[in-house]
Amino acid sequence: MAEIEGEILISRPVEEVLDFVADQRNEPQYNPRMVRAAKVTDGPVGRGTVFRSAAKSMGRTAEMSIELTGYDRPAGLASRTTMRQAEMVGTLSFEPAPSGTRMRWAWQVRPKGAVRLMAPLITWMGRHQEQAIWTSMKRYLENTPATS
Protein backbone atom coordinates (compact mmCIF):
# COMPACT_ATOMS: atom_id res chain seq x y z
CA MET A 1 0.00 0.00 0.00
CA ALA A 2 1.17 3.51 -0.80
CA GLU A 3 0.40 6.48 1.45
CA ILE A 4 0.34 9.98 0.02
CA GLU A 5 -0.09 13.11 2.13
CA GLY A 6 0.36 16.81 1.64
CA GLU A 7 -1.12 20.26 2.06
CA ILE A 8 -1.47 23.56 0.25
CA LEU A 9 -2.65 27.10 1.04
CA ILE A 10 -5.26 28.54 -1.33
CA SER A 11 -6.26 32.21 -1.30
CA ARG A 12 -9.99 31.51 -1.45
CA PRO A 13 -12.69 30.94 1.21
CA VAL A 14 -13.02 27.44 2.66
CA GLU A 15 -16.56 26.84 1.33
CA GLU A 16 -15.57 27.86 -2.19
CA VAL A 17 -12.55 25.53 -2.22
CA LEU A 18 -14.49 22.56 -0.82
CA ASP A 19 -17.39 23.05 -3.26
CA PHE A 20 -15.00 23.27 -6.21
CA VAL A 21 -13.01 20.18 -5.18
CA ALA A 22 -16.09 18.10 -4.31
CA ASP A 23 -17.48 18.43 -7.83
CA GLN A 24 -15.12 16.21 -9.82
CA ARG A 25 -16.49 17.69 -13.06
CA ASN A 26 -14.21 20.67 -12.32
CA GLU A 27 -10.99 18.66 -12.40
CA PRO A 28 -10.39 18.78 -16.18
CA GLN A 29 -10.15 22.59 -15.84
CA TYR A 30 -6.95 22.36 -13.79
CA ASN A 31 -5.59 18.82 -14.23
CA PRO A 32 -4.27 18.30 -17.79
CA ARG A 33 -4.22 14.51 -17.25
CA MET A 34 -7.97 14.38 -16.60
CA VAL A 35 -9.67 13.93 -19.96
CA ARG A 36 -13.24 13.40 -18.80
CA ALA A 37 -15.36 13.70 -15.66
CA ALA A 38 -19.11 13.17 -15.39
CA LYS A 39 -21.52 12.97 -12.47
CA VAL A 40 -23.56 9.76 -12.72
CA THR A 41 -25.83 10.04 -9.68
CA ASP A 42 -28.83 12.34 -9.33
CA GLY A 43 -29.14 15.21 -6.90
CA PRO A 44 -26.66 17.69 -5.48
CA VAL A 45 -23.01 16.81 -4.87
CA GLY A 46 -22.69 15.21 -1.43
CA ARG A 47 -22.11 11.93 0.36
CA GLY A 48 -22.88 9.07 -2.04
CA THR A 49 -22.31 11.08 -5.23
CA VAL A 50 -20.53 9.03 -7.90
CA PHE A 51 -18.46 10.35 -10.79
CA ARG A 52 -17.01 8.49 -13.77
CA SER A 53 -13.72 9.93 -14.95
CA ALA A 54 -10.80 9.13 -17.20
CA ALA A 55 -7.19 10.27 -16.89
CA LYS A 56 -4.15 9.88 -19.12
CA SER A 57 -1.43 7.87 -17.45
CA MET A 58 1.74 6.54 -19.07
CA GLY A 59 0.28 6.78 -22.58
CA ARG A 60 -3.01 5.12 -21.67
CA THR A 61 -6.41 6.31 -20.55
CA ALA A 62 -7.34 5.01 -17.10
CA GLU A 63 -11.08 4.81 -16.43
CA MET A 64 -12.15 5.36 -12.83
CA SER A 65 -15.16 5.60 -10.56
CA ILE A 66 -15.01 8.16 -7.75
CA GLU A 67 -17.50 8.01 -4.87
CA LEU A 68 -17.78 10.66 -2.19
CA THR A 69 -17.95 8.51 0.95
CA GLY A 70 -17.94 11.48 3.31
CA TYR A 71 -19.13 15.07 2.95
CA ASP A 72 -18.83 17.47 5.88
CA ARG A 73 -19.12 20.97 4.43
CA PRO A 74 -16.99 23.00 4.94
CA ALA A 75 -14.52 20.85 6.91
CA GLY A 76 -13.86 17.79 4.77
CA LEU A 77 -14.46 15.19 2.12
CA ALA A 78 -13.73 11.47 1.92
CA SER A 79 -13.68 9.43 -1.26
CA ARG A 80 -12.99 6.06 -2.82
CA THR A 81 -11.55 5.88 -6.32
CA THR A 82 -11.67 2.54 -8.09
CA MET A 83 -9.60 1.75 -11.18
CA ARG A 84 -8.53 -1.45 -12.86
CA GLN A 85 -4.97 -0.90 -11.57
CA ALA A 86 -5.68 0.30 -8.02
CA GLU A 87 -8.10 1.52 -5.39
CA MET A 88 -7.53 4.78 -3.55
CA VAL A 89 -9.29 5.89 -0.37
CA GLY A 90 -8.66 9.04 1.54
CA THR A 91 -9.67 12.39 2.87
CA LEU A 92 -9.38 16.06 2.11
CA SER A 93 -9.64 18.53 4.97
CA PHE A 94 -10.27 22.26 4.69
CA GLU A 95 -9.63 24.82 7.39
CA PRO A 96 -9.52 28.61 7.46
CA ALA A 97 -6.05 30.11 7.23
CA PRO A 98 -5.00 33.78 7.39
CA SER A 99 -4.61 33.80 3.60
CA GLY A 100 -7.71 31.71 2.76
CA THR A 101 -7.85 27.92 3.07
CA ARG A 102 -5.41 25.25 4.19
CA MET A 103 -6.28 22.05 2.31
CA ARG A 104 -4.72 18.75 3.38
CA TRP A 105 -4.92 15.40 1.64
CA ALA A 106 -4.23 11.89 2.86
CA TRP A 107 -4.62 8.97 0.45
CA GLN A 108 -4.03 5.25 0.75
CA VAL A 109 -3.40 3.64 -2.63
CA ARG A 110 -3.87 -0.11 -2.91
CA PRO A 111 -2.34 -1.30 -6.19
CA LYS A 112 -3.86 -4.40 -7.79
CA GLY A 113 -2.16 -7.30 -9.55
CA ALA A 114 1.39 -6.84 -10.80
CA VAL A 115 1.17 -3.11 -10.06
CA ARG A 116 1.54 -4.02 -6.35
CA LEU A 117 5.26 -4.49 -6.94
CA MET A 118 5.51 -0.79 -7.79
CA ALA A 119 4.16 0.53 -4.44
CA PRO A 120 7.34 2.49 -3.55
CA LEU A 121 7.36 4.12 -6.99
CA ILE A 122 3.64 4.85 -6.73
CA THR A 123 4.24 6.62 -3.41
CA TRP A 124 7.01 8.77 -4.85
CA MET A 125 5.13 9.57 -8.07
CA GLY A 126 1.87 10.09 -6.20
CA ARG A 127 3.34 12.72 -3.88
CA HIS A 128 4.70 14.68 -6.82
CA GLN A 129 1.55 14.31 -8.92
CA GLU A 130 -0.79 15.32 -6.10
CA GLN A 131 1.29 18.40 -5.32
CA ALA A 132 1.29 19.36 -9.01
CA ILE A 133 -2.47 18.81 -9.37
CA TRP A 134 -3.38 20.83 -6.28
CA THR A 135 -0.90 23.59 -7.17
CA SER A 136 -2.56 23.84 -10.58
CA MET A 137 -5.99 24.01 -8.91
CA LYS A 138 -4.72 26.72 -6.56
CA ARG A 139 -3.55 28.80 -9.55
CA TYR A 140 -6.85 28.21 -11.32
CA LEU A 141 -8.98 29.29 -8.35
CA GLU A 142 -6.80 32.26 -7.44
CA ASN A 143 -6.85 33.53 -11.05
CA THR A 144 -10.59 33.03 -11.64
CA PRO A 145 -13.04 35.71 -10.50
CA ALA A 146 -15.14 34.72 -7.47
CA THR A 147 -18.61 33.48 -8.37
CA SER A 148 -20.44 35.27 -5.55
Image (cartoon, helix red, strand yellow):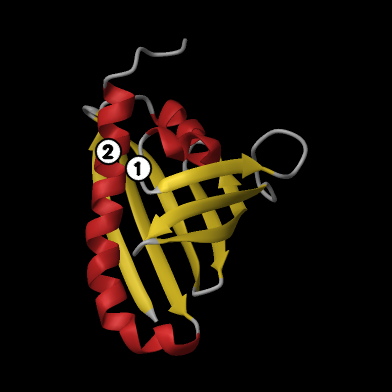
**Residue 54 location in percent, x, y?**
52, 52
**Residue projecting furthest to the right:** 42
Tell me which amino acid carries mark 1: Pro
Secondary structure, mark 1, is: loop
Residue depicted at 42% across the width and 71% down the height: 108
Indicate left or right for 87 with 119 as reference. right
Residue 117 vs 101, above or below: the answer is below
Number of numbered labels in the structure image: 2
Q: Does residue 101 appear anywhere in the picture? A: no
**Residue 102 location in percent, x, y?**
29, 40
Residue depicted at 49% across the width and 87% down the height: 113
**Pick the front one: 136 or 33:** 33
Secondary structure, mark 2, is: helix
**Residue 87 location in percent, x, y?**
52, 71
Residue tagged 1: 32
**Pick the front one: 27 or 114:** 114
**Residue 144 location in percent, x, y?**
33, 18
Report the disc number at residue 142: none
Residue tagged 2: 136
Quadrant, the N terminus: bottom left
Residue 2 vs 15, above or below: the answer is below
Tell me which amino acid carries mark 2: Ser
Residue depicted at 36% across the width and 36% down the height: 30
**Residue projecting furthest to the front:** 59
Give me the C-alpha separation between circle 1 and circle 2.
9 Å
Does the CB distance between marks 1 and 2 fall below 8 Å? yes
Residue 145 vs 108, above or below: the answer is above
> To which quarter of the image does residue 82 belong?
bottom right
Q: Residues within 10 Å of mark 2 (few under 14, many from 20)?
A: some
Tell me which numbered mark, 1 or 2, is placed earlier along the sequence. Answer: 1
